[in-house]
Amino acid sequence: MNVRFLDMGDRAFTIELDSAINPRAKARVASLDAALSAAGLDGITGTTQAFRSLTVHYDPLRARRADIQAGIEGLLDDIDATPEATPTRWALPISYDEADAPDLDAVARATGVSPDQVVEIHAGCEFLVYMLGFLPGFPFMGDLPDRLHVPRRAEPRVRVPSGSVAITGSLSAIYPWESPGGWNLIGRCPVPLFDVTRSAPALLAANDRVCFQPVTAAEAIRIEKAIRGGEVSPDSFREVVTA
Amino acid sequence: MMALNVIQPGLMTTVQDFGRAGMRRYGVPLCGALDSGWLRLANALVGNAEETAGLEIHLTGPILEAEADGIRVAVVGPALVLAGPQGEQQPVAAWRSITLKRGDRIQVKSVTEGTVAYLAVAGGFDLPEVLGSRSTYVRARMGGLDGRPLAAGDRLVMASSAPASGLDLTMSAPSVDVDAPIRVVLGPQADHFTDDALRALEKETFHVGNETDRMGMRLSGPVLRHQSKDRAEIISEGVVPGVIQVPGNGQPILLLADSQTVGGYPKIATVISADLARVARSAPGAEIRFRAVTVEVAEDAAREVERDLRSRIAAVRPLAQGYDVALLYQGNLIGGVVDCKNPDNFPGHLETHLEEPSGGMRR
């Protein structure tokens, strides 16, 4: 599709690069974000990556939208849709224990597979982090295979425990905070996703890859305590890439 | 110790500065003052750097008690402010600083127009920056005082240990045209809405709903219909404070400082930065009308607002005496009263009062 520049007031605008959610669109968003950062256009105060769009924030006292847009149009020919060759990969522990997965049975019923198969499919995916949002550090990750697609719960929960791993449509996510939420809860990840004392407070970043490694509920609690006690660093779940 | 003790917290009093613009990529809301212009004015009145964190007050403000002599504070906004020793508090104009003695209390009794006022303290608060800001973000228990609104019994320690010196400062209250339409730029998804909806946005009156907080403001008014059901959702993308998103029920929500960074509802329009503070300060029930302008007009307006703020800050002037009766009158905060410290001076003889300064209240 053609690139569209969408007005969003006088301090931001959104550049829409594709019409759908897919890794190719996401790669183009990441590529444009990197190009923009390298170009150092005057007046830009930040960017927000999303599935298929990049929102550019600017200071109207320092620059005009028209000038910034002209600068960006000059970069568009060079962006590419090739996903990063060596993204950061994570292997995060997950408990699919009944107590940690209140919607596992309902998902199984809705999709016509057994609960064990739901676990097998989810744990077998390598997820792409499309973007962070909704809550600080909340990763929107895809893509689940079609046979695991389920809608949001008809009754959103008032209280989703922090660490809950949830799915809806083609996406999976981890709730970094206790919050209301409508996604289907199928597990719990004991690794904290957000820490204000880190310079990059979110553990995951857009374009990272995430796999889940099943552990028992008891092991998840042990990992959680070890991280809290400072014996284990959340960074230790980053996979070391051997070329 | 230079500190203020929180005797009463007020309805929803939070520490705010300019927020966390650099943290959007981690999914952290902007946060910060709903009206950063007024926070800047409050800081100017106590000699602070403009971006110093102050207290954002909603409707009913706190009662704070000075723990030491020489704590200088200023309230900005249409607020009824009382100050003085416990039991002897007297009205003080907003839009000026006041220097508290040990045991003095300052109370922002009520915000009289809209819902928001700011209180700045000379030197600022001794609170840690969290992700580049002292702004309170309650939902993630981040910033400010343990990530929550003020509570009775809290102690706000000043970052500076030196008592205020020199004269208190004052400025004239800016006049706000509360009836002027709120200007918007249409989009990003104006093309998801029916022609009737776009017409209604500009022609009809909306009201600020009761369900309003720092995250967003519900607007009641005509239903803004999407062209079809599948145009009522979009693939989630970046949002900013000021966007007017419209869920499937057609009832618009104006996002404010604590709004999330991305959203999946179509946005019919975005309030321009020059007008966002005015609508964010509005009380439930207030009437709002919208008028569409271009991005260029919005940018010009932003520059004009900045020029106006700078000239107001440049015009801050010392207060020759404790009371600035002229300001009290201008703010309609007093009328028909006798100054107990200057009983011969009657209302109506304002010029006399100004020419023959009395001892003043708190100096």
Image (cartoon, rainbow, N blue to C red):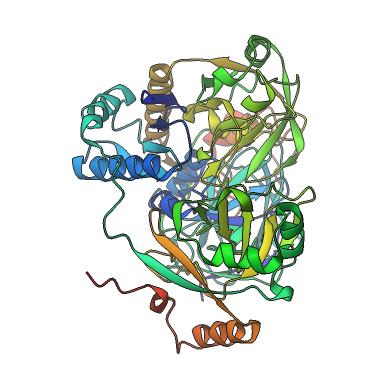
- Asked if B127 appears above or below B226 in the picture, the reply is below
Q: Give the image location of residue B24, x and y in percent.
A: 44, 50
A13 or A21: nearer the eye? Answer: A21
B6 or B56: nearer the eye? Answer: B56
Residue at point 47%, 28% (across, down): A8
Q: Quadrant of residue B84?
A: bottom right
Would residue B118 be seen by someone viewing this image from the given angle?
Answer: yes
Q: Is residue A123 left or right of residue A60?
A: right
Q: How many marks?
A: 0
- Asked if B105 appears above or below A21 in the picture, the reply is below
Would residue B346 be seen by someone viewing this image from the given angle?
Answer: no
B202 or B157: nearer the eye? Answer: B202
Q: Give the image location of residue A232, x and y in percent.
A: 44, 85
Q: Is residue B223 left or right of residue B52?
A: right
- Asked if A50 appears above or below B292 in the picture, the reply is below
Q: Give the image location of residue B154, x and y in percent.
A: 65, 71
Q: Quadrant of residue B234?
A: top right
Residue at point 39%, 79% (across, down): A236
B91 or B212: nearer the eye? Answer: B212
Q: Is residue B51 left or right of residue B145?
A: left
Q: Give the image location of residue B58, x and y in percent.
A: 68, 47
Q: Which quadrant of the figure contains the C terminus of chain B?
A: bottom right
